Structures are given as C-alpha cells and as structure tokens.
Image (cartoon, rainbow, N blue to C red):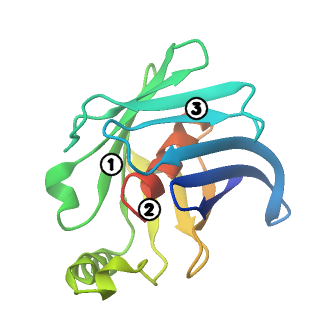
Amino acid sequence: MQVLHVHQKVTFMINRYEVFVDDNGEPGELVGFAEQNKFKIKERITIYTDSSKSQVLFEFNARKALDLGSGYDVTDANGRSIGLFRKNFAKSLLRSTWHLEQPGWGESTGAERNKWLAGIRRLWQWIPIVGEAPFPMRYHFDFTKNGAPVFSVDKKTWIRDHYLVRIQDPGVDRRLVVAQAVALDALQSR
C-alpha cells in the first residue's frame, strides 16, 4: 500500500497543494506541487514535481466551463492521457460521488464514507453566514472497483485541509489518484 499526504494552503487568490510521500506516519519527500486560481471560469490545475514549478508532472482540465458531470481529463507532461474523473451530479446531490477511469484498467467509484455527515455538510452550506465558513467536521472518501478497495482520502485535521491518501490497488496510476485527491478539495470548495 502506498500512502501520501496532501496539504492545502489557502491564500487570497490561490489555493496551494503539496503532496508528500509518507515517512512513518508523517509527510516525507515532496512529490507534487500545484496551485489553483480561485477565479477561473474553466478549471485547469497543473501538478509540478516541486514548488519551483520547473517540471510538469501532470495536469487535469475541465472538459467544459460549467461542469455538472462532464469530467476532467488527466494528462501527463507530454499531453498523453492518464485517465479522467467526473462527478456524478445526481448522486452528489445527497452524497458526493465520483467516477475515476484509467485506460486499460477500468473504472472505480468513490463516495463520501458517511452518508449522514454528507447530509449535515449540505445543510451547513445553507445556513446564513455560517455556511460561508469551512465545514468543521472531518470527512472521508472511499474509491472501489468491483467491490474491492482502490484508494481512500481521509481528512486528518479539523480546520486546515490535510488529507491522508491510501492507495490499496497497485494497478491504479498514482498521478490519477493525486489528481482526484486534489480535486476533492479544489472542486468542491472544501
């Protein structure tokens, strides 16, 4: 099993993401760095090998400006397809649900682990003034393929967005998993 740590740092105009390999339960070597402009019409996030942004690792791009389920293409540094992910809009009204596809490997589906917490999180967003604040509870996503675990994304902190990503299926491309983990935060306004 591979374990990664994804940390988000919020600034006024940009969300920054750092991805680390696990080192005995703590973040180890930095293996990915990304920045998300908060005010883009059509989402495009590039993940670099480090914070110098000198070498592209991969990127993901929205297929449409208004994306209610059309998907995001994940490509390597040369523009070759790694796979895609898409939100299941209808199922996500009650419980966020995503589909992840990798050529030659198949598709996995991920959803929030706790359906009750998912419901409370949706209600939180509708409370005046309070709904603008970050949701204070930790939430988790589990991705499976044919009933077998593929990877999980667990929020580890209450206030800051730190996630622990556990990859159980060695057949899934780690870059695709990192793209989905960043998207769970970046694309759902977490």
> How crowded is the residue under tag 3: few (<14 C-alpha within 10 Å), some, or many (20+)?
some
Measuring from the top left, give residue 121's x and y in whole percent. 31, 78
Measuring from the top left, give residue 185's x and y in whole percent. 46, 58
Which residue in the protein does label 3 denote?
173
Measuring from the top left, give residue 115's x and y in whole percent. 29, 74
Which residue in the protein does label 2 denote?
141
Separation of residues labelled 3 and 1 (CA atoms): 16 Å
- Tell me which numbered mark, 3 or 1, is placed earlier along the sequence: 1
Identified at 19% across, 44% down, the residue is: 68
Residue contact at pointers 1 and 2, CB within 8 angstroms: yes
Secondary element at image label 3: loop
Identified at 59% across, 27% down, the residue is: 58
Type of amino acid under label 1: Trp
Separation of residues labelled 1 and 2 (CA atoms): 9 Å
Identified at 53% across, 30% down, the residue is: 59
In the displayed structure, would residue 110 be above or below residue 125?
A: above
In the displayed structure, would residue 14 be above or below residue 84?
A: below
> How crowded is the residue under tag 2: few (<14 C-alpha within 10 Å), some, or many (20+)?
many
Dot label at residue 98: 1
> How crowded is the residue under tag 1: few (<14 C-alpha within 10 Å), some, or many (20+)?
many
Residue 20 seen: yes
Type of amino acid under label 3: Asp
